[in-house]
Image (cartoon, rainbow, N blue to C red):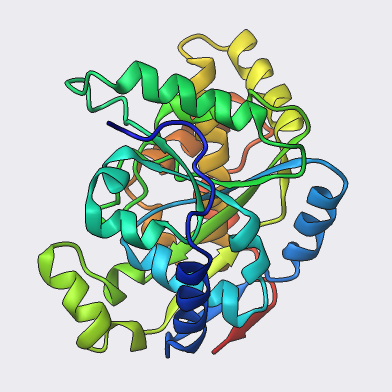
Amino acid sequence: MSKEGYIPRRSEITYKLESVLLGKLPVKYEAVGLEHFTELERLLENGNTGFVTPDHRTYADIASGAVIMFKEKKGSLIRKGVFIISQKYIDRELSDFFLRGINVIPMISPTMKDDPRQTEVNMAGLRAVRNRPDGTLFVLTPEAERIKTGKMEKARRESTSFWHVKRNVYLFLVAFERTEVQWPPGKKGTLHYWFGGGMLHKMRVIFGKPIEVKKMDQIVNYLAQNYDGFDRKQLSVDMAMRGIAILHLTQGDKKYVEGSYYEDLMRDLSSKSWLFLKPEELTKFDPSRKRGV
C-alpha cells in the first residue's frame, strides 16, 4: 500500500544523524548568491509560500546541496521544508530509510502512465501542498528526470500546478553546475561520489533572487494573449526555468544552456518582444558575489 499526501518526518534520529554526517563531508563547492537567503527567510516569516526550484543533474544536487545548506547554517530550512519527490523513492526500502528524516510529498511522474496509482497519488499530493500552512518552503525539481545530456531539459508543464494551488508564492531558483562531475550518471556514479573522490571536485551552486509567481504570471498572460502557440502551463514553468538559464549565463557556465531547449526558448522570446534579451546578450553581465569552500 503506497503512502500518499503529506508524510511528516518519521525519525528525529535519522534527521540528526544525516545533519551531522552532511555537515562534516568534505564537499568542495562555490556558492553564489547566498545573500538571497535573507530575503527568502523574510518572505517565509511573513506568511508567503516558497518553492525551491532547481535544475537537476545528478544525485549530487541533493547530497552536495544538503551539505552546503548545513555548512552555511541553513539546515533549519531542510528541517522545516517539504520535499516533493517521486513515489518510487518511497516504494524502495533503502531510499525510504534515508527519507525518514525529512518531510515529503510523493508524486508519480506523468511519464509513468502505467502506474494505476497516478491520479490518486498526484491528487493527494496537490491537496497536501494546498493544505500546508502559509510560510511553508517546498522543494520541487521541474525537469522530467535527472539531466543526462548535461544540458538543461524541457521541464514538466504539470510542475506549475503546485505553485498555483497556493497564494502569495515565490520561487527560489537554483542552478547547479559540475555536480555531474562529482556524481556521474550510472551505477558507478554512487561509488565515485562516496569513495572515489567525487565530492572533492568543486561544484558550483547559484542561488537566485526570489521571484513572485504573480508577477511572472503577468508576463505569461501577456505572451499567451499576444502570440499564438503558447501553452500557458508549459510557458509558466518555462519562465521559471528561463530564470535558471539566466543564472547559468550570467553567473556560471553557459554550456548548460547552449544547445538546449531553453536557449531556443530565449531566442524565440527575444524575437517576439523587446522585453527579452538573447542568451549572448545576457552573458555580458558580471557575476555577483561568490563564496568558495
Residue 189, placed above or below residue 39: below
Considering every residue shown, the one lying at the far right of the view is: 46
Residue 108 vertical position relative to residue 67 in the rendered view, above or below: above
- Residue 70 in view in this figure: yes
Q: In which quarter of the image is residue 122?
A: top left
Query: Which of these two is toward me, 51 or 147?
Result: 51
Q: Quadrant of residue 240?
A: top right
Instruction: Name above or below for residue 239 compared with residue 97.
Output: above
Provide residue 253's location: percent of width, then percent of height.
45, 67
Give the residue displayed 52% in from the left and 54% down from the top: 9
- Say which of 205 and 88 sits in front: 88
Task: Name, please, the residue furthest toward the left.
Answer: 187
Residue 88 position, x and y percent, is 26, 42
Placement of 202 over or under 81, stated as above or below: below
288 or 180: nearer the eye?
180
Residue located 41% across and 63% down the image: 62
Q: Residue drawn 48% across and 61% down?
A: 11
Nearer the observer, 247 or 61:
61
Q: Where is residue 67 in the image (x, y as percent from the top left)?
A: 49, 76
Residue shown at 70%/44% (left/top)?
136
The answer to whether residue 204 shows anywhere in this view is no
Q: Position of residue 188 (x, y in %)?
A: 12, 72
